[in-house]
Amino acid sequence: MKIMPIKLRPLWLTAAGISVAALVAPVAAQSLITGYWNPLGHQDAYHYAGGPDPGDFSGLPITDAARKIAQQYDADEFHMRELMCRPFPATYGPRTLSTMRIWETLDPQTQEQTKIETQMGFAVQHRVIWMEASHHPYPSASEPHTWQGYSTGKWVGNVLWVHTDHLKPHYLQRSQGLPLSDRTTMDERIFRYGNILVDIMMISDPAYLSRPFIYSKLYAYLPQGNMDPYPCSVRNQVPMPEGHVPMRLPFYTTNYNAAFAAKGIPLEAARGGEQTMFPEYQDYMKTLPPNPPYSQLDAEQQKQIEQQSATSQQKFP
Amino acid sequence: MHTFSSERGAVRAVSIASRRALWAGLGLAAASLVVGLAGQEGATGRPPQAPQPAFGDPVNIYASNAYAPAREDGEIHPSHVRGQVWLMTGEPGGSNVVVQLGDQGVLVVDTGTKAMAPKLLAEIQRLAQEHGGEHKEIRKVVNTNGRLDHIGGNETIAKAGSEITGWNDGILPGGERAAPFVSPGAEVLAHENVLRRLTAGGTDEFRGLEPTDAESFEIDNQRFNGEAVQIYHPHNANTDGQLVVLFRGSDVIAAGDVVDMNTYPIIDVKAGGTIDGELVALNKVIAMAAPGPLAEGGTVIIPGHGRACDQADVALYRNMLTIIRNTVQYYKNQGKTLQQVLDLKPSEGYDQSWGGATSGSWTTRDFITAVYETLPAKGPVFFSMKTVTSVPSGKQF
């Protein structure tokens, strides 16, 4: 090996030292998060693969108002002409099994990030995260809200902080009809460990959540990703008269649920609420009486449940 | 790898190692200096950074980014909607005002409250000067209903305008065309039921606010400022004098109080309003709108109060009201009294977002009462456009 001429050594070593310093000092540290990311679907598969049973709200910090809306929810709502092409909102899309693409835009003169954009594979959920260098004006109170909302972001160390608001009314969990209002906000922390991307979402809603709903999603780097177009045409799939709204009539006198009984979930736990979020609740839950199987109910109870079930499932004539 | 002869080589190796250690030390010292300076930036001129919230705090750290003026700050804020249409907002407790500009002049939909009328007029006139067409006069006012927060500025706004009542085909000496016949005051168009209710009391309370052109129609197609303006009258919606205005070229609907992004719709039972009429009107607005791709954007719908919206917003609003209406009808079919229905809280899930007020001019109790009173004692539980059962009360025309 040839020795470097001695007159260059001071410069080389000094440069190396400064490089070390640059790594140590937290000045404008950013992670490279652009590219395609594949969702890791092992997390909370019960909630997001098939979805929990209707009426099982355990583990969710919902309010009484949210529960009441969900109890009248009918999934045929998704077949309404005006809503069938609705994409997942910003608070829901990252929790599903869609590939995500992230790209950035830089100011050509200053090379500062002006915006970071994300797109999920399903239904072209395209979100713009305006960075501070963009000086993008905040939307006025009279502007329409959108499914993806208005997002602003900034780097804190190597973590991207994102705040989102101006969302349309949407849902916390689609399959159950749990609502979120148009006052919902979401704060995210997005960071990268090697080829793993982490998105921690903290969703707040003064109307339907008594505490922030916190969720983390992992993605694996996808070197050869792609994204297909998503055309959506409105077609009648479930015939219904004009103006009809799918819903369930109120039936909350017994709250009996055969699905919970089969899984051994106590009715009290299925009601959800912030107390059911915490690990200690599992110990408490063991003290609750289980739902008796339907076959163990007496005839009068069975008749009452059948009547309520029939009422709730009444449809338009 | 360098190899050296024993003693001389050892001395030379130590010498090189020492020099390397020296330069490495200098390098690290420089690095330490850089790190140190970086750490002292706050103390040497640059203001220290505000403490960051804890990692898990779900707080809006971008609140200072909110450049938008407060919505109800006592000033009128014009904002361009699309095409020839502008939205005027900012009036405390008042309604949205929609303005269309073009070569024929200015068309104004609703005039807000009387108190804010001078400020509204000033903003309309400024807007017309800056963005208007050949004629900048206020030519036409349309009232979407007869409530005071929609017609309060009629007198002030109309007086500042003028109406062309005919064209003079004569040619003056010198070849110049004669001026058209112009009468002072803009035309004020409303449904005739608005005029009937304003004058029914026989008092002077509403003098000056009356429409100058009160007509009865279901659909009135006009052309103004180069675009089709379609005016639709839904029967017995919030009132029996409701109008919805579609600017077809600009693709904007001024829905009046049929859509309200702040609260449950104000159903004025004494003025002929009914819940089923309201749902018919909402379904009509939805049908008039053309959505953008993926259920977002497209036709802009300006509600009587609150933020602008699109077809999906109105569909969600319609869904909520239909679910409440069906639940009330289900209870009423069981023979439950109004008080029993109120006790069952049929709108509880939505009250925090859309109602919830226990006092004031329009409470949740008022809304449920209006729904209950305008449904039949026995009727179809599920509303659809085929099962409308409006039961208007109050004086009918």
Image (cartoon, rainbow, N blue to C red):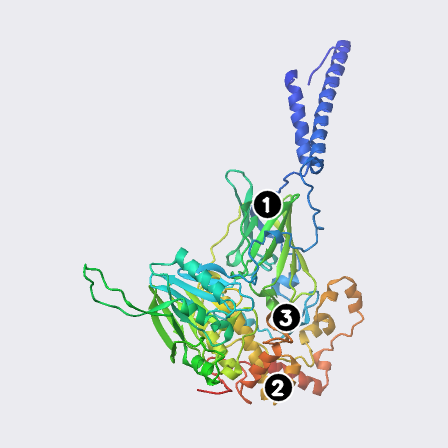
Work out whether residue A14 or residue B184 is closer to the camera in this orientation and state it: B184
Q: Secondary structure at mark 3?
A: helix
Which mark, by number, is residue B338?
A: 2
The chain identifier of the residue carrying mark 1 reads A
Estimate the spatial distance between the alpha carbons at disc 2 and disc 3, rounded to whole Å. Answer: 21 Å
Residue that carries the numbered disc 1 in the rendered image: A33
Residue B240 versus residue B135 in the image, above or below: below
- Specify whether residue A32 is in view: yes
Judged left or right of residue A296, residue A35 is: left
What percent of the width, then of the height, locates residue B373? 56, 85
Q: Amino acid at mark 3?
A: Gln
Measured from the top left, where is residue A2 in percent x and y? 63, 17
Mark 1 closeness class: few <14, some 14–19, many ≥20 residues within 10 Å:
many
Foreground pick, B79 / A59: B79
Specify whether B340 is left or right of B129.
right
Chain under disc 2: B
N-term-proximal mark, 2 vs 3: 2
Residue occupied by mark 3: B352
Residue type indicated by callout 1: Ile
Q: Single out the mark in the foreground, 3 or 1.
A: 3
